[in-house]
Amino acid sequence: MARMPMARFGDIYASNLVQVSSNIEDLQAGGRWAVAIPFVGKPVLARFSTWSESAVDPELIGTWTGVSPDSWVSSLDQDSYMNAVRTTQTRIERGDVYQVNICRVRTAELPPGNDIMALDALLQEGNPAPFGGAMRLPEQGVHIACASPELFLSRNGSVIASGPIKGTATEASGISGKDEAENIMIVDLVRNDLSRCADTGSVFVSDLLEIQIHPGLVQLVSTITATLAAGSDWVDLIEATFPPGSVTGAPKSTALKLIAELETEDRSYYCGAFGWIDADNHQAELAVAIRTFWIHGSDLKFGTGAGITWNSDAEHEWEETELKARRLSEVASWNR
C-alpha cells in the first residue's frame, strides 16, 4: 500500500489530508491541524479531516531497517562543542547574555525505503514520551518522529500553559544547583513570553522544579499557566512564545544571535514546535521538538544540546548532549 499522509499524537492518528499550509494565519479558518514549526524554516501545517483513536492499519506503516550506531556524524565534534561552551561563558562574563542553549545536529546515512512512521512505532516501544508523535507528508518531503518529554504550549479554551525543562541527569541525585538556577531563569523567560498575550496578572507558576523520570534519565520541569487575553488569536500566541525559551536562552534575542554564530548547522525541526492544534475547539498541545528525528534527503537527522551558564563545565555539557542522544540512537538502530 502506498504511504499516505498521516500523523500521530499520543493515541490519536490523523488521516485524510485536506490541506497543507505554511501560513499560521490559516489556523483562523478552523479545522484540526498537525503542526511542525521548525526552529529554522517555514511552518508545516497539515489539516486532516479524520482524527481517530482506533488502531492504525498495519499496512499503512512501512519498515525500518535502522542506522548503524557508529555511523552518526556530529555538526560539532567534542572539541568544537566545548569551545562553543567556553565562548558562551565569555559572553556571559561580559554581561551580554545569562544563559544559552548550544546544540549540535547528528547525521547518519539512511538506507532507502525506510518509513518514519515505523521509527515512530519503535520509539513508542523503546522510548515512550508524553508528547511523542510523528508526521509523514511524502509529497512535501516532511518526515518527523518525535519523542519529546517537554511541553512547549498547550491551550484549553482560554487557559494556556508551558512546561520548560532545564536540568538533566541519569538520576535525581545528579540534579545540581546549577540545574535549578538555570530552570528558574528559563521560568522567568517563559513567564515573560506568556505575559505578552495573557491577561494581566494571570501568569502563574503552578509547579516549580519538579523531577520527572524518563527512559535513561531524569529531568527538572516547571509549569507555567496563564489566561489568554481576549482578542488574542493563534498568531498572537505563537508569535509571543516562539521559539521556546528552554532551547534558546536569556535574554532570548541575544541568545538567538549567539546560537546563529556558534552552531555550524541549522536546527531545522529540532527545537521547534511539534504537535496539534484544534482551531475549532480552541485546543492545542505542542511539544518542544527535542528528542526528535527527521529525514533529510538520504540522511537521518537528530539534534542534541545543553543549556550553558557561567558555571557550566564544558566537558560535562558535552556529556549531557551524549546522554540525551544515547537511548534514542539505540532505538534508531533497531529493525521493524
Image (cartoon, rainbow, N blue to C red):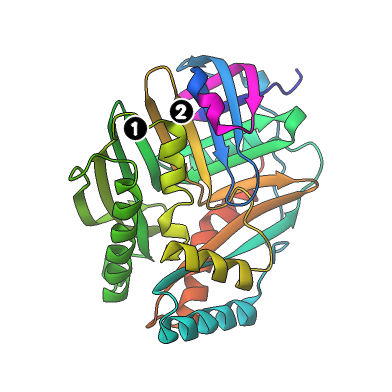
- Three-letter code for the amino acid on which mark 1 is drawn: Arg
Please give the residue where the numbered disc 2 appears in the rendered image.
277
In the displayed structure, 301 sits above or below 225; it is: below
- In the picture, measured across the screen, residue 15 lies left or right of residue 90, that is right
Residue nearest the observer in this picture, 218 or 278: 278
Q: Quadrant of the N terminus?
A: top right
- Three-letter code for the amino acid on which mark 2 is drawn: Ile
Splitting the image into 4 quarters, where does residue 311 fall? bottom left
Q: Badge 2, how many Cα within 10 Å: few under 14, some, many 20+? A: many
The image shows residue 38 at horizontal and vertical percentages of 59, 46
Q: Earlier in the sequence, mark 1 or mark 2?
A: 1
Q: Quadrant of the C terminus?
A: top right
In the displayed structure, 187 sits above or below 43; it is: below
Q: Is residue 19 magenta?
A: yes
Q: Is residue 224 magenta?
A: no
Q: Which mark is residue 155?
A: 1
The image shows residue 270 at horizontal and vertical percentages of 57, 52
- In the picture, measured across the screen, residue 320 lies left or right of residue 303, that is left
Residue range of the region highlighted in magenta in the rendering = 9-27
Q: Which mark is residue 180?
A: none
- The residue that appears at 48% across and 15% down in the rendered structure is 52
- The residue that appears at 50% across and 43% down in the rendered structure is 273
Splitting the image into 4 quarters, where does residue 208 fall? bottom left
Q: Badge 1, how many Cα within 10 Å: few under 14, some, many 20+? A: many
SS state under label 1: strand
Q: Is there CB contact under 8 Å for labels 1 and 2?
A: yes
How far is the residue under mark 1 from the one under mark 2? 9 Å
In the displayed structure, 252 sits above or below 44; it is: below
- In the picture, measured across the screen, residue 157 lies left or right of residue 143, that is left
The image shows residue 36 at horizontal and vertical percentages of 57, 38
